[in-house]
Image (cartoon, grey):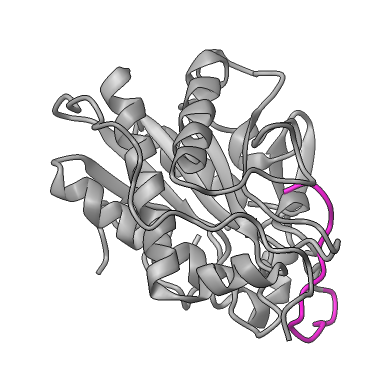
Amino acid sequence: MVAVRANPLPLLTGLALLTACSGGSEAASPAAPSSSPVAAQSSAPAPPPVTTSSSQPAAPPVSPGKVVVLDPGHNGGNAQNPQEINRKVPAGRGQTKPCNTTGTSTNAGYPEHAFTFAVAQEVGKALAAKGIKVVYTRSDDTGVGPCVDKRAEIGNEAEADAVVSIHADGSTSASAHGFHVAYSAPPLNAAQGEPSSKLARTVRDTLRGDGFATSTYIGSAGLSARSDLAGLNLSTRPTVLVECGNMRNAEEAAQMSSASGRGKYAEAITQAIEAYLGAS
């Protein structure tokens, strides 16, 4: 999330729509989150193809009792509730931000909130199968929020060993493609220091090792130091936000819109979390 991004959804009165997940807020449903898994594109140059199988070495064993919080960005009911998602909430570093935003979508209309929820569910199921406790910040794709401060609170209260917020970007720049991983900088507490930096590097290295291209337009070599994202600022646990790619790029939009493409993203993120936990 870096700059405000355009959204192909109709503009709602008073609703701040994003042009890119990079510049918006990160999203509470009124109900408590589940603590276990619930059940014309741009003509931009295509990024390098994604490999069909993992090239990563086996992750070290994860010790029992690890907790992971998965934060699928935005929510399916946000666009119909502008008053709720536009209200200001604490965002850390003395800032306030809107409670949440609608997110972006592909040019064909596949929404970011659906992509992030689907990927988070796959990641969560894979981690739970390894005995890792998984907590979600939202349990469906039809609700509103949670607000960005609540999402950070969920990770803190769960005493998560890792928090991964899953998003996708929406840059309209012709050559913009690739993923990037955001982390809090300068850090506000110990967890935002080396633990979060290490988690960011592990996610970056694993995605890159699995054939995903790093961003051509945000950050450096797939990493982006941020001081303006509430979910990172307010966290007291190792936390990163991964923008899986640019939904306005034809190649990446096709990957995100397909079940097989989402599966590749989920596999890489799962591997990264396991690698981080195994080395922690």
Q: Which residue is drawn at 66% across and 74% down?
A: 105
Residue 30 in sight from this viewpoint: no
| In-image side of 3 versus 153 (left or right) | right
Choose between 48 and 226: the one closer to the eye: 48
Give the residues in magenta: 1-14
Q: Can residue 227 be seen in this view?
A: yes
Q: In which quarter of the image is residue 215?
A: top right
Magenta residues: mostly which secondary structure?
Answer: loop
Q: Is residue 261 magenta?
A: no
Q: Looking at the picture, does residue 253 appear above or below residue 272?
A: below
**Residue 233 picture location, percent across and down:** 64, 32
Q: Is residue 181 above or below residue 196?
A: below
Above or below residue 175? Residue 69 is: above
Q: Please tell me in which quadrant of the rendered image residue 149 appears.
A: top right
In the rendered image, residue 271, in percent from the top left (x then y), is placed at: 33, 40
Comparing 11 with 96, the one in front is: 11
The residue depicted at 48 percent of the width and 36 percent of the height is 203
Looking at the image, residue 175 sits to the left or right of residue 235; the answer is: right
So how many labels did they put on this image? 0
Image coordinates for residue 101, horizontal then vertical, percent: 69, 64
Residue plotted at (41% across, 61% down) = 119
Q: Is residue 43 left or right of residue 60?
A: right
Q: Where is residue 97 in the image (x, y as percent from the top left)?
A: 76, 49
